[in-house]
């Protein structure tokens, strides 16, 4: 639509947002249609630029529009956005879920029974004392402060933590550095928050130095990094790469650095931090959902004092605290020797099955290296979408790398993300056969 379109009306942020919402509902603004730039809309309506910014932010948060930072704002399309762990598989065998094996998740029954005996009232500490003690031991070795100065916050999972961390640090149109390819939730957070996402390429050693330097030169005020088991590539930072990234960040001590170590207990790789001892704004996020179960929506975040204070303001008692019942279940599971042994076995199982399938593909002429994580990142010599279509005909539902891209490129992705740890040897062999046949047909 033209930037001079008179359809949008209103003198306050709420009125402008309601006007846009009404135009969308009546079909006068079509899905994917561009809205006027903030400055043009403000001039058109005779309002302050901040009023237009607030209107667009409210619309983005309610899902009416998608903000692409300096690239503009568009009416959200009605098609479903990709969702981690879900696809309409129907009769197909879904090997793109990224889900854990239910048989390798600890039984929560005993922990639930033990945790249900005490009621929590308003005004009590937001973190149970036992969980705080356990979490402190979990986080303290990997943050740039001593245990006595460690500030911990609980959120409803890692995605919740990252969203709140970015929201307290960024305004609409602010720049955030995100890995590319990228975890689906991070892409959605950038869109809904109205942030300008600058892609930082990922290679076999994790986030690249040149990519991070470029993002910071572009004005990135926050960086989100997955130090190990990067989703979808499976890459983990080496000690050398982490040191090089710390060196780059040393010149930007007030850029918020969020390290999402979601795979922690399951990882086969050591943790290497990109936050140096002098960095001023940082957060380490660790969730329990990958090993204690996706429904265990609890993450522990360790932050610098200022970031922690801002985060805690959004998680005050009586509003959005994390259930103490969930906290006690988590503590019971994570201090149970049998549960910990099962979690260790799960991590070894995922690594072994990924390595086995990667070896199978490599032996058959499709070189593949197994990274860390729940899934396998498979490079192809042809466009992944073409291979996907042929695999669908053979009964497999897979996920291409296109959905994990931060920005749409001219060239289609040549990667598949496969979750193969729950396949039998016979099923794995059949998938490998079908995948190689599909590649041959596309070559």
Image (cartoon, grey):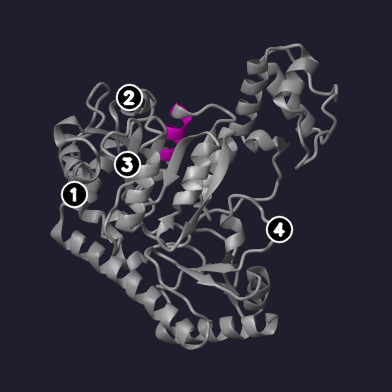
Residue receiving disc 1? 332
| Image position of 135 (left or right of 211) | left
Give the spatial CA distance, label 3 vs label 2.
16 Å
Which tag, 1 or 3, sits closer to the chain's start? 3
What element does badge 2 sit on? helix
> Which residue, given by chain and number where applicable, does mark 2 sit on?
306
**Which callout, 1 or 4, points to the residue nearer the camera?**
4
Mark in the foreground, 4 or 2: 4
Q: Which span is picked out in magenta?
A: 161-168
Residue designated by label 4: 410
List x then y, in percent, for residue 89.
Answer: 58, 67
Label 3 or label 2, whichever lies nearer to me, is 3
Main SS class of the magenta portion in the image? helix
Between the C-alphas of marks 2 and 1, the distance is: 31 Å
Alpha-carbon neighbours of circle 2 within 10 Å: few (<14), some, or many (≥20)?
few
For label 1, count other residues whose C-alpha is less than 10 Å away and answer few (under 14), some (14-19) or many (20+): some
Residue 205 vertical position relative to residue 440 in the rendered view, above or below:
above
Q: Give me the C-alpha separation between circle 3 and circle 4.
A: 34 Å
Tell me the element at label 3: loop
Nearer to us in this view, 85 or 173 = 173
Please report contact status of discs 3 and 2: CB closer than 8 Å, yes or no.
no
User: Does 153 sit above or below residue 10?
Assistant: below
Give how far across and how far down residue 131 sits, in percent: 19, 40
- In which quadrant of the rendered image does the N terminus lie? top right
Q: CA distance from mark 1 to mark 3?
A: 31 Å
Residue at the image point whose x is 65% and y is 27% from the top: 56
Q: Quadrant of residue 126?
A: top left
Mark 3 vs 2, N-terminal side: 3
| Rendered residue at 77%/16% (across/down) | 43
């Amino acid at each position: 639509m033209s930037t001079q379109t008179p359809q949008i009306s209103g003198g306050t942020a709420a009125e402008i947002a309601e006007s846009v919402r009404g135009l969308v509902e009546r079909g006068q603004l079509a899905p994917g249609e561009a809205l006027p730039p903030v400055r043009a809309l403000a001039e058109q309506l005779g309002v302050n630029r901040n009023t237009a910014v607030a209107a667009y932010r409210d619309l983005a948060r309610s899902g009416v529009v998608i903000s692409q930072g300096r690239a503009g704002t568009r009416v959200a399309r009605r098609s479903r956005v990709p969702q981690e762990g879900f696809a309409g598989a129907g009769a197909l065998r879904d090997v793109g879920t990224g889900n854990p094996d239910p048989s390798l998740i600890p039984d929560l029954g005993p922990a639930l029974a033990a945790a249900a005996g005490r009621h929590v009232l308003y005004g009590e500490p937001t973190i149970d004392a036992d969980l705080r003690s356990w979490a402190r031991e979990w986080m303290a070795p990997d943050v740039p402060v001593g245990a006595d100065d460690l500030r911990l916050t609980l959120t409803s999972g890692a995605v919740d933590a990252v969203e709140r961390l970015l929201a307290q640090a960024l305004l609409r149109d602010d720049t955030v550095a995100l890995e590319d390819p990228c975890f689906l939730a991070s892409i959605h957070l950038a869109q809904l928050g109205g942030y300008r996402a600058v892609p930082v390429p990922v290679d076999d050693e994790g986030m690249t130095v040149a990519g991070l330097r470029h993002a910071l030169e572009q004005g990135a005020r926050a960086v989100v990094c997955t130090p190990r088991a990067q989703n979808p590539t499976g890459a983990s930072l080496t000690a050398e790469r982490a040191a090089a990234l710390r060196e780059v960040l040393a010149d930007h001590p007030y850029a918020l650095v969020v390290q999402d170590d979601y795979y922690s207990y399951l990882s086969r790789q050591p943790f290497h931090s990109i936050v140096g001892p002098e960095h001023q704004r940082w957060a380490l996020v660790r969730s329990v959902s990958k090993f204690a179960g996706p429904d265990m929506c609890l993450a522990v975040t360790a932050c610098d004092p200022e970031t922690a204070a801002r985060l805690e303001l959004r998680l005050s008692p009586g509003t959005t605290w994390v259930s103490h019942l969930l906290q006690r279940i988590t503590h019971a599971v994570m201090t149970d020797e049998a549960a910990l042994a099962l979690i260790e076995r799960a991590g070894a199982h995922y690594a072994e099955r990924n390595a086995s399938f990667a070896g199978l593909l490599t032996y058959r002429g499709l070189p593949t290296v197994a990274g860390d994580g729940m899934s396998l990142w498979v490079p192809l010599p042809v466009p992944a979408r073409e291979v996907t279509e042929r695999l669908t005909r053979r009964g497999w539902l897979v996920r291409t790398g296109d959905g994990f891209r931060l920005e749409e490129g001219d060239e289609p992705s040549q990667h598949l993300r496969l979750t193969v740890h729950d396949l039998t040897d016979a099923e794995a062999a059949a998938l490998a056969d079908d995948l190689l046949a599909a590649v041959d047909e596309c070559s």
